[in-house]
Image (cartoon, rainbow, N blue to C red):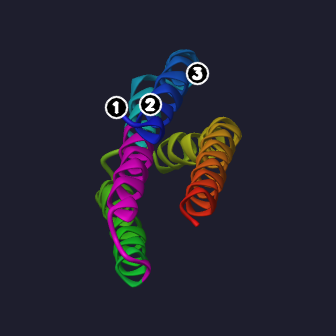
Amino acid sequence: MSDHWRLAFRCAGLIILLAIPAGALLMYLYGRPSGGAFGYGVAVGLLSLLSTALTVTLLARRSMAGGMAVGAASFAGRCVFAAGALGAPAYLGLWPVLPMLGGFAGVYLAENVVLLPGALKISHKSIKREAERSARERVERRAEA
């Protein structure tokens, strides 16, 4: 499993650990529908988070132009998915809207707080590997000359 998938699953696990007590508290204070709506919002947010890891996997195997196209399509797809997954139940009145959106927004907040430092570590590792590889190539070229 690659670093970005490991990071995404670790972040998802942490979000679930934080969401369970928050959902239980909402359920206790405001009733079962609010707790369920919060859980639904968290689930939609987690699916969106994991789709980001899929996008990174697809970007790594493409040219620059192909990567930009995949990234744009993925972003648009995530936006359409979130709008449909949150908008349809809100429009139909299936879930209380505020807890549902709170769960979804909470995932994005936690994702930025938890995922960003890990993503920076991964990018620093890849930059360091690339620099070491190019240094080895330069030494090899000099040895050949």
Q: Which residues are magenta?
A: 43-64
For the residue pair 144 and 96, the one nearer the viewer reads as 144
Q: Could you tell me which residue is drawn at 36 percent across and 51 percent down?
A: 51
Question: Residue 44 colored magenta?
Answer: yes
For the residue pair 113 and 79, the one nearer the viewer reads as 113
Pointer 2 residue: 6
Q: Is residue 105 left or right of residue 39?
A: right
Question: Residue 130 colored magenta?
Answer: no
Could you say whether the residue bearing mark 2 is in a helix, strand or loop?
A: helix
What secondary structure is the magenta-colored segment mainly? Answer: helix
- Name which residue type carries label 2: Arg
Could you say whether the residue bearing mark 1 is in a helix, strand or loop?
A: loop
Pointer 3 residue: 18
| Res 47 label | none
Going from the N terminus, do you reach mark 1 or mark 3 first? Answer: 1
Q: Position of residue 38 (x, y in %)?
A: 47, 35
Distance, label 3 to label 2, CA atoms, is 18 Å
- Name which residue type carries label 3: Leu
Mark whose residue sits in front, 1 or 3 = 1
Distance, label 2 to label 1, CA atoms, is 7 Å
